[in-house]
Amino acid sequence: MKLNIPNILTWLRIAMIPLVVGIYYLPDGWMTPETKNLTAAAFFAAAAVTDWFDGYLARALNQTSAFGAFLDPVADKLMVAAALVVLVELSRVNAVIALIIVGREITISALREWMASIGERKSVAVSFIGKLKTATQMVAILLLLYHGPLAAGLDAQTAGTFLIYLAAFLTLWSMAYYLKMAAPQIMKADA
């Protein structure tokens, strides 16, 4: 494993996961619910920024590595899954929506691994719809963690709920897209 700046940022993102989750398990007297929400949202936002920044730096500094390519998506999926579990427990996200999102992540990760094993990983490379799904999902989770009032009388829970449903739709759409791209190889494997 090569320890470079992008990989360190990815490890930091993984280290922030217990902070996002753990904040909600602190004794009530330590922080108000609003402070817990704001703190968890801030940690999640910082983690989301490192997601973009580590990829940018890996390319800009020519520090891409096989380990970084493996660890980055694992960190993303752990971060999203952990936040969704907390949000389900706090009754801010429907469990079915969380299951759709986490189930898709597992399915597409397995598909990408299988496609890589047969030398066809590029067939299921990240697409625009996948990037749009991720951006929508990250903003939705951030708003749902924050759970407070926003500008112009908007409520973070309402906006976050709308976006998490949109993210679930994009999740299914992107999964269908990746499965379609892999379909010729799947059919060939079954023949």
Image (cartoon, rainbow, N blue to C red):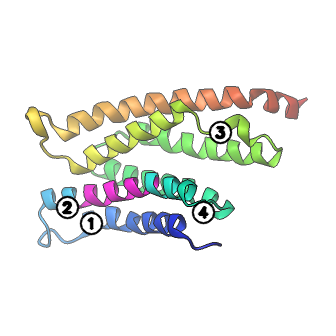
Q: Nearer the viewer, residue 146 or 3?
A: 3
Q: Amino acid at mark 2?
A: Lys
> Badge 2 local density, few (<14 within 10 Å), some, or many (20+)?
many
Cα–Cα span, label 2 and label 4: 36 Å
The reply to whether dot 1 and dot 2 touch (C-beta < 8 Å) is yes
Cα–Cα span, label 3 and label 1: 35 Å
Q: Earlier in the sequence, mark 3 or mark 1?
A: 1
Q: Amino acid at mark 3?
A: Ala
Tell me the number on the disc at residue 125: 3
Looking at the image, residue 160 lies above or below residue 166: below
Q: Nearer the viewer, residue 13 or 27?
A: 13
Q: Which residues are magenta?
A: 39-51
Looking at the image, residue 134 lies above or below residue 65: above
Cα–Cα span, label 2 and label 3: 37 Å
Q: Amino acid at mark 4?
A: Gln
Q: Earlier in the sequence, mark 4 or mark 3?
A: 4
Q: Earlier in the sequence, mark 2 or mark 3?
A: 2
Tell me the number on the disc at residue 63: 4
User: In which quarter of the view is residue 60 placed?
Assistant: bottom right
Tell me the number on the disc at residue 23: 1
Residue 111 placement, left or right of 137: right
Closer mark to the observer between disc 1 and disc 4 = 4
The reply to whether dot 2 and dot 3 touch (C-beta < 8 Å) is no
